[in-house]
Image (tube, grey):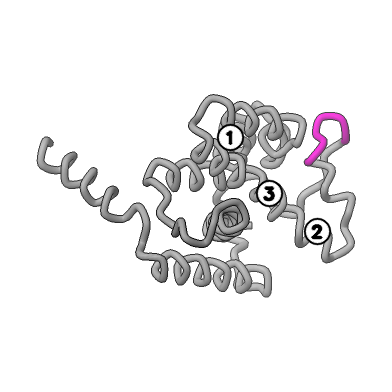
């Protein structure tokens, strides 16, 4: 899954979790820090694994260490424990939604063996068709039904964010103004 797809899935999962856990009178107004931690969580496995595998070559593939449930569970639970409850949950939801999103298409296609990365290093890694590099992945990019679904999910997430008043935007703009005026 591409970064925008992970961001959309994580945001929509977070929205669902918030609706399930809070009363309808509370509204949807997460803090900027919470939304930033959610966004980081949605990208976290790729930010760790892909550079360490494709650039530094210390991991065997782009879905290993941070994509493994053996690592994801303690890191996400640690985030919940260390951060405030809302931000910790947002990070964990973003992180775990990444792993789920990476698993959906192989499941739909009946390629259960492709999910071995979820238990790496206990299970051997699946083989990947695209060369292990950022350039090869960008060169192989085509609009497939999967990519179109990711764009649709991203549109849905942006639509929701707009419909609930663009939470976090004013705080982000204020932070940017502070940085620009002090530079």
- The label on residue 25 is none
Q: Is residue 57 left or right of residue 41?
A: right
Q: Is residue 17 left or right of residue 104?
A: left
Range shown magenta: 118-123
Which quadrant holds the N terminus?
Answer: bottom right
Task: Quadrant for residue 12, please give it.
Answer: bottom right
Tell me the distance, in whole angstroms, between the alpha carbons under discs 2 and 1.
22 Å
Could you tell me which residue is drawn at 61 percent across and 46 percent down? 93
Numbered disc 2: secondary structure: helix
Q: Earlier in the sequence, mark 2 or mark 1?
A: 1
What type of secondary structure mainly makes up the magenta span?
Answer: loop
Q: Earlier in the sequence, mark 3 or mark 1?
A: 1
Circle 2: is it few (<14), some (14-19), or many (20+) Cα within 10 Å? some
> Which one is in front in this view, the residue at disc 3 or the one at disc 2?
2
Tell me the distance, in whole angstroms, between the alpha carbons under discs 3 and 1.
18 Å
Q: Is residue 137 visible?
A: no
Tell me the distance, in whole angstroms, between the alpha carbons under discs 3 and 2.
19 Å
> Which one is in front in this view, the residue at disc 3 or the one at disc 1?
1
Task: Quadrant for residue 163, please give it.
Answer: bottom left
Residue under numbered circle 1: 48
Could you tell me which residue is drawn at 68 percent across and 30 percent down? 59
Picture layout, residue 26 above or below residue 93: below
Numbered disc 1: secondary structure: helix
On the image, the x and y values in percent for residue 156 come to 52, 71
Residue under numbered circle 3: 131
Q: Is residue 164 left or right of residue 113?
A: left
On the image, the x and y values in percent for residue 66 come to 66, 34
Q: Earlier in the sequence, mark 3 or mark 2?
A: 2
Residue under numbered circle 2: 106
On the image, the x and y values in percent for residue 100 come to 72, 51
Picture layout, residue 121 above or below residue 150: above
């Amino acid at each position: 899954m591409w970064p925008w797809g992970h961001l959309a899935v994580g945001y929509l999962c977070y929205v669902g979790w918030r609706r399930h856990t809070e009363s309808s009178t509370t509204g949807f107004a997460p803090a900027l820090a919470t939304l930033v931690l959610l966004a980081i969580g949605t990208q976290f496995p790729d930010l760790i694994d892909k550079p360490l595998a494709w650039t530094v070559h210390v991991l065997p593939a782009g879905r290993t260490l941070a994509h493994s449930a053996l690592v994801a569970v303690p890191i996400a639970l640690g985030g919940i424990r260390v951060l405030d409850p809302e931000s910790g949950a947002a990070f964990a939801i973003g992180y775990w939604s990444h792993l789920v999103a990476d698993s959906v298409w192989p499941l739909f296609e009946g390629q259960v063996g492709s999910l071995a990365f979820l238990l790496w290093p206990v299970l051997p890694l699946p083989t990947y068709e695209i060369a292990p590099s950022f350039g090869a992945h960008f060169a192989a990019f085509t609009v497939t039904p999967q990519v179109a679904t990711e764009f649709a999910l991203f549109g849905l997430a942006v639509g929701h964010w707009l419909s609930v008043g663009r939470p976090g935007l004013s705080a982000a703009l204020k932070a940017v103004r502070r940085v620009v005026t002090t530079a």
